[in-house]
Image: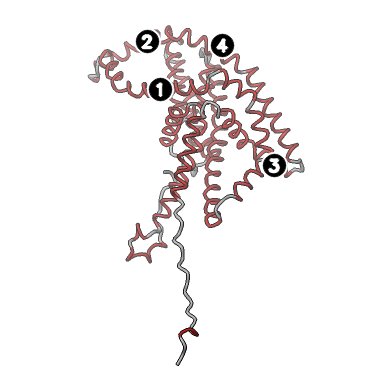
Amino acid sequence: MTDIRDINIEFEEPTPPPMRRWPSYLVALIVFLILVYLLRTVLLPFVAGMGVAYFLDPVCDRLEKWGCSRILATTLVTIVFALVVVLAFLLIVPLLVDQMTAFITSLPDLVEKAHQRLLPLYESFRLRFDLPAVDDLGAMLKNRLGTVFGFLTQTVQGVVSGGAALANLLSLIFITPVVTFYLLRDWDLIIARVDHLLPRDHAETIRTQMRAIDTTLAGFVRGQATVCLILGIYYATGLMLVDLPFGLVIGMMAGILTFIPYVGAMSGFVTAMAIALATFDGWHGPAIVGGIFFIGQVLEGNFLTPKLVGDRVGLHPVWIIFALLSGGALFGFVGLLLAVPVAASIGVLVRFGIGRYLVSPLYHGHDRQEDADIVPEFPDQP
């Protein structure tokens, strides 16, 4: 008979339940957003420096491949970039300021002249096509666009109050170059340190999504900046060649605002056409101005944007406009700087989440899990 004391029974330790990490991530995200909101008035030079460093990091990497040390490459890139900015301010900004001041001063007269010239034309169309009267049309536009203009006014006020104060301007001038230099110098070290802190179970997935975000930002930010510069030079040169008053400031603003889809071209076209109608006799001048913007849109849509930005960055124009308006209204100028990176990140993460959903039992059903390997096609843009 076997003694019960001689029997060794091994008990398996229960497996601990998996740790739910999403509450911690959610709390960290909420704390981060609260800190950004509270510190939005002092974050401007750091966010701007981070953006410039991200923009210039590929140049430093290229110089390193050519044999320069990181310190030397960072110093050269920072000095050249600072010189370009200073020369632009010394050569172009005073002329833009003078034209902008003169444009604002003469704006009421230009509007009145354009109104007097367009009113008979509209009256002829109104009688022929039974359009509303001018007074009714104005009231209709006021009712329809009042809410939009109110929201835009609040957004601009938030941007100005958060980004145009003297302290923020001084910080942009003196602190941003320092932040840019140190971030450029330590960029690879910072990336390596962040990579080391990633949770090991999900490190490769996070790296994949970060690479997708980087591709999106590189394609949009760097490519769109080049498109804005080319279009600004084109519009300004074309309008100045036809002797349009304030052509330089209108062309440069139209090119700069091109990063907001449809806003740059439409605002520049409307402003230039109004000045052309008030300035030129006949329809020859306004037709040339309209042709300049038409050619610019053809160049942007068929050559510049496909070649420099690409069509697979995954940022829908409506999504960009919403991100810019929301960022400006909530966080001021800092929100404008963060709007596109945040929009790109959210777009990549949403596509990743939808991709996981399309291969999950929640989409295929528990009884059809064998079809999970067949992933339906999904558009790139969110």
The numbered disc on residue 117 is: 2
Nearer the N terminus, badge 2 or badge 3? Answer: 3
Nearer the N terminus, badge 4 or badge 1? Answer: 4
Cα separation between marks 2 and 3: 56 Å
Q: Label 4 neighbourhood size at 10 Å, few (<14), some (14-19), many (20+)?
A: few
Tell me, yes or no, whether the two marked residues, 1 and 2, touch with CB atoms within 8 Å: no
Cα separation between marks 1 and 3: 43 Å
The residue pinned by badge 4 equals 98
At label 2, the amino acid type is Arg
Q: Is residue 376 above or below residue 274?
A: below
Nearer the N terminus, badge 1 or badge 3? Answer: 3
The residue pinned by badge 1 equals 154
Q: Of helix, strand and loop, which one carries label 3?
A: helix
Q: What sort of colour scheme is used for the picture?
A: secondary structure
The residue pinned by badge 3 equals 62
Please name which of the two marks, 4 or 1, marks the residue nearer to the observer. 1
At label 3, the amino acid type is Arg
Nearer the N terminus, badge 4 or badge 2? Answer: 4
Q: Of helix, strand and loop, which one carries label 2?
A: helix
Q: Nearer the viewer, residue 346 or 171?
A: 171
The numbered disc on residue 271 is: none
Q: Is residue 348 above or below residue 368?
A: above
Cα separation between marks 4 and 3: 39 Å
